Image: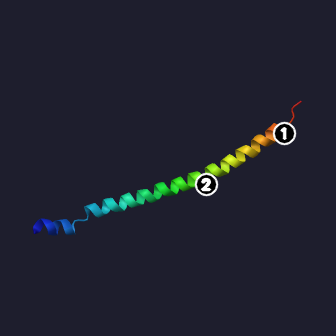
Amino acid sequence: MPLLKRFRTSEDGAVTVDWVVLTAVVVGLVAAGTLAVTDGTGDLAERVGSYLASITVG
């Protein structure tokens, strides 16, 4: 019985679970931000490439 009581009152595992959840949220936000930036930079790169291709030098 003392082992069960000590296990029930211990919070060591709860802290680990909190950190795992927090880390998963941060990774998800970084992934979403990366996708948003990638889409925007791809469009910008295409527009810059088109503009540079239309310029005549000489």
**Residue located at (87% from left, 34% from top):** 56
Q: Residue at x 42, y 56 (%)?
A: 23
On the rendered structure, is 33 left or right of 21? right
User: Residue at label 1?
Assistant: 54
Q: Earlier in the sequence, mark 2 or mark 1?
A: 2
Label 1, secondary structure: give it: helix
Describe residue 42's horizontal placement relative to residue 17 as left or right: right
- Residue hosting label 2: 36
Residue 22 at x, y percent in the picture: 41, 60
Lateral position of residue 45 relative to residue 15, left or right: right
> Colour scheme used in the picture?
rainbow
Q: Residue at x 15, y 67 (%)?
A: 4
How packed mark 1 is, by other alpha carbons closer than 10 Å (few <14, some 14-19, many 20 or more), is: few
Q: Is residue 10 above or below residue 37?
A: below
Instruction: Give the answer, above or below, for where 32 lies relative to 2.
Output: above
Q: Residue 54 appears at what percent x and percent y?
A: 84, 39
View extreme (top): residue:
58
Residue sitting at x 43%, y 57%: 24
- What amino acid is found at the position of numbered circle 1 in the picture? Ser
In screen coordinates, is 25 left or right of 9? right
Residue 30: where, in percent of width, then height? 52, 54
Indicate which disc residue 39 carries.
none
Specify the quadrant that holds the N terminus. bottom left
